[in-house]
Amino acid sequence: MHHVIFRADNHSEKLKKLSLTLGYKIQIFMKHKPFISLVASLLYIPLFAGAAQLCIMDQPEPGGNIISVKPSENTSSDSVLFKKIEDLDKGITDYEHRFDILEKQIDDLLWFERLGDVAHIDKVRLTSTPRWKPKDPDDRFATNKLQFYTYVFIPKNINPKKKYPLIVLPHSGIHANFSTYYYHIVRELIAQGYVVVSAEYRGSTGYGKATYENIDYGGRENDDVLTSRDYMIENYSMVDPHRVGVIGWSHGGMIALMQILQHGDKYQCAFAGVPVSDLENRLASHDKSYSDYFTAPYHVGESIEENPEEYARRSPSHYAENLNKPLLIYTNTNDNDVYVEEVQLMIDKLKELKKDFEYKVFQDASGGHGFDRIDSKEATDIRFTVYQFLKRYLHPPHPFASAGEMRKAAYVF
């Protein structure tokens, strides 16, 4: 691993401490994102021009140092250095978002490369509801609808004069995106004759800092997903508005629950795999880094202790009494992300309310959190049972007769 060390020899102890701190931070970046770290170290050069003297050595010093920086004799004050560090931190953060955009654009090419033989693929830009609260109370444009992208996948062998079922498939992960991680699943759906739509809802990565900070976990992100569903029905005549299902895993499973519980009239059924279900339980069972997503000033900005009602509003368990459509829930006892106890709370709440739904708790299935999204035979056999559930309510034109037939459709052999 490369190391970048900033030296402050013969200057104040405070300056030395700042230099070492900055060096440590960049080493952390280099460990996890080497390319970003390289850019960060290069950015440091112009930022400190005139205030520091760079010494780029041919050979690393002991310990692996390859670059050292000495403040020059005319360094003005420590306050200048503080300002430069703040600018550098901001630059590094902005570059993280820039590289997320690049990663997303590369992955988009993979969608066309890997699925283009069986599907018409498009990516469209839509508008949904405004931010749930303005970042700036004086923003004259605070009521503007937010823009977002959504993926559209249509089987190439469709007859435009006929009607086909629609699957709404929100991606998983807090601050994530719809990547080719879901390639085989989309291919399986396309093979059965489903049209698929997947919204890159607010808070998704790969679209810059503004989209990232528009996150509304459990809130208006659900509006974006519903908007993508409505867009398909309004613009594609082959989509049957009476055969629409929503499926998702993890955070996508949470959104699937929210869709069927808050907009049951828009869907015929839902599948929620290892779904985030109850934020009170989730925050209590996870470390502070998870809570930090919510207490960020651009998001909720308050802890669950300060505003428990707001967190309840963002939890599917809060809406369990609304269930009036077929629902299937899967969870796994060795899930290391959405713990089985959290999903069990949702299951128990639905049982208590005497709701008609289906569920299964898998015992230590291989793959933990992704047990039915990976590519093993065990996982694809489980996915086949999900498609069997969907078939009962959505009647796809080419349902799989067996798990083996499903594997051939997705994996060729």
Image: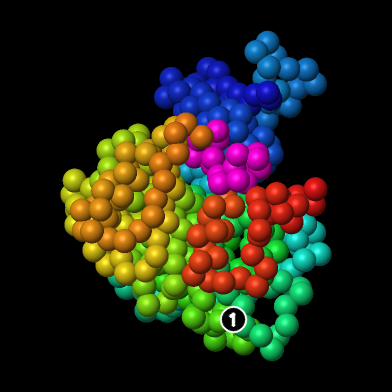
- 82, above or below 255, in the image: above
Residue at 78% across, 17% down = 59
Instruction: Tell me where residue 300 appears, x and y as whole percent.
Output: 30, 56
Q: Is residue 314 above or below residue 224?
A: above
**Image quadrant in which the N terminus is located:** top right
Position above or below: 232 against 118: below
Residue shown at 80% from the left, 21% from the top: 58
Residue that mark 1 sits on: 239
Mark 1, secondary structure of its residue: strand
Q: Residue 404 in the image: x percent, y percent?
A: 70, 49
Give the x, y percent position of residue 30.
62, 31
Is residue 381 visible to us here? yes
| Along the viewing direction, whichever of 295 and 378 lies nearer the viewer | 378
**Crowd band around label 1 with a 10 angstrom C-alpha radius: few (<14), some (14–19), many (20+):** many
Measuring from the top left, give residue 72's x and y in whole percent: 60, 29
Q: Does the magenta segment cover residue 41?
A: no
Residue that protrudes farthest toward the front in the picture: 401
**Does residue 132 appear anywhere in the picture?**
no
The span picked out in magenta is 366-382
Quarter residue 358 falls in: bottom left
The answer to whether residue 118 is left or right of residue 53 is: right
Viewer-side residue, 369 vs 79: 369
